[in-house]
Amino acid sequence: MIRCEHLTYVYGRGTPFEATALTDVSLAISTGEVVGIIGATGSGKSTLVQHFNGLLRPTSGRVLLDDVDIHGPRVDRRRIRQQIGLLFQDPEQQLFEETVVADVAFGPRNLGLSDDDARARARRALELVGLPPDRFGPRSPFELSGGEMRRAAIAGVLAMEPRMLILDEPAAGLDPQGRRDILEHVRRLHRDGALTIVLITHSMDAVAQLCERLLVLDQGRLVADGPTRAVFADLSRLTALGLGLPQVTLLARRLGERGLPVRRDVLTIEEARVAILEALAVRGRGVL
Amino acid sequence: MEFFRGLVLGQYVPVDSAIHRLDPRTKILATLLLLTVMFAVREFAGLAILTVLLVAVALAARIAPAYLLRGLRPLFWLLVFAVVLQVFFGEPGGHPMFRWGPVVVTRENLAQAAFYGWRLLLLVLSTTVMTLVTSPMEFTDGLERLLRPFQRVGVPAHDLAMMMTIALRFIPTLLEEAEKIMKAQMARGAEFTRGSLPARARALIPLLVPLFVGAFRRADALAIAMEARCYRGGENRTRMHMLRFGPQDLVAVTVVAAAAAFALIPPAAWRGH
């Protein structure tokens, strides 16, 4: 659905502050995928996704949505932004309306929907993120808790009814319960809403649980692109890039080093549980 | 899309040059002197001398000319407007050069327009050069020191300087935040650059509300952080970087003063000798 061809982006061209943020990035994301983007701070993750909905224009290279160049002459930028929902980091900053429901309806209203339709969409979106519209809708967005604000902001993007949802660190700065809630909602959006998801995060655990495929960025270059399990198989490389492994994968490795023959490529707690029980059974037989 | 791209004024470029190393007081006073002289000058020759001086300073400070010109870009329309106004609606009388319906363009008015345009350019150029070679910190340090004698008559020099430091410090932060919020709202289908004037004004609400909320939050956090480090105003405060007025500053002041004096002497006086 989205394809980048030799994407290069230079910030502050022609000033003393010129800096290359992305160098020759080529990738494709298909409908229905859940893709994680990981990389150290400043590796270009946020810059990359801002190209997906045309907020940034590539210095060179192309971005295509359904094989159409999004900077082509007859492309309606607003339609691109409706289809590719982008949630920025700390999205609670974007809240501004007097009520939650009005804020969430901002996107649909911009798309030219009537007040009633926009409101209906807003209510549906609030429902999707677990904020019952009857209770939360009439409240001021500024009196919500951190986690609720975050979810209201996500609803603000969902109300556009995009086909792809890009989330930039959606769980950062939330307490553990808030973090679990957000990730659970993302998972559900993919499962029930058939949304294509792109998740930027520093949490290896989150991508291990959610993403089938990982893109790894390093200093503006795409250095790895493959199934999550394959990417996490190369610990030394990830460490060199300033990244790490999910906790459970690390646990499995440690157990392996201590002599318990556990599969080293587990990604979730459930997989780890099964793998450890299997390993114990194998060892049990060996001892007997 | 990058917003605020043309904004150079106040964007300090850290380079090590003789000009950058000057005492900020020297730079402030020199700029003030030049600005005053620019208003006092009556002849093209004077403007030429000041232009040569500014170009020399910019070269010595190793400012890329393209970067400097970029900073003048926002001024372009104002300049065009001022010049056109002067050419067509200047004083009556003089030598007509050409006629265009009821409008008469005279040689005198054309010269006047060129003079005012050039002067406007120089005014902006001189302040731009100063902000490019003086870090905001140095600038407020220098200003505080220059204002200190006026403390006796009730000028709160330190507080003024501190307020300015904070304001300057947060300009880039606020711009960055404004850009981010703008993008976030654009991702929700907002348009900031299209539509009628009232529509555009209304489009600013989703930008301004979050920006103000953020600014207040930041101000609060900053106040707490300052108090946590026992800030209580300027009394008995010592400085990490002491200002030193050295021989190079004396040279700089002399050069600028000399150029200013030359610029003020009317060419007729030269010819008289």
Image (cartoon, coloured by chain):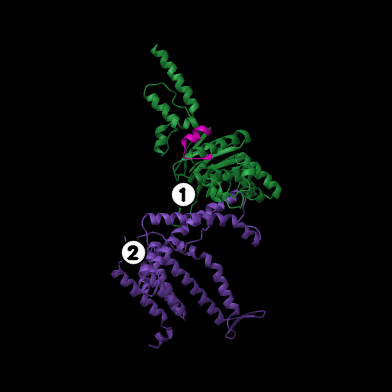
Chain colours: A green, B purple
Residue B135 visible somewhere in the drawing: no
Q: Secondary structure at mark 1?
A: strand
For the residues beneath circles 2 and 1, the answer to whether they share a chain is no
Q: Position of residue B50 (x, y in %)?
A: 42, 74
Chain under numbered label 1:
A
Q: From which residue to which does the magenta span run?
A: A199-211
The residue singled out by tag 2 in the image is B21
Q: Amino acid at mark 1?
A: Thr
Q: Nearer the viewer, residue A266 or B158?
A: B158
Between residues A245 and A178, which one lies in front from this camera angle? A178
Residue A95 to residue A230: above or below: below
- Letter of the chain that mark 2 sits on in the rendering: B
Q: Looking at the rendering, in which quadrant would you find the C terminus of chain A?
A: top left
The residue depicted at 41 percent of the width and 27 percent of the height is A253
Q: Which residue is mark 1?
A: A20
Percent of width and height locating residue B123: 47, 72
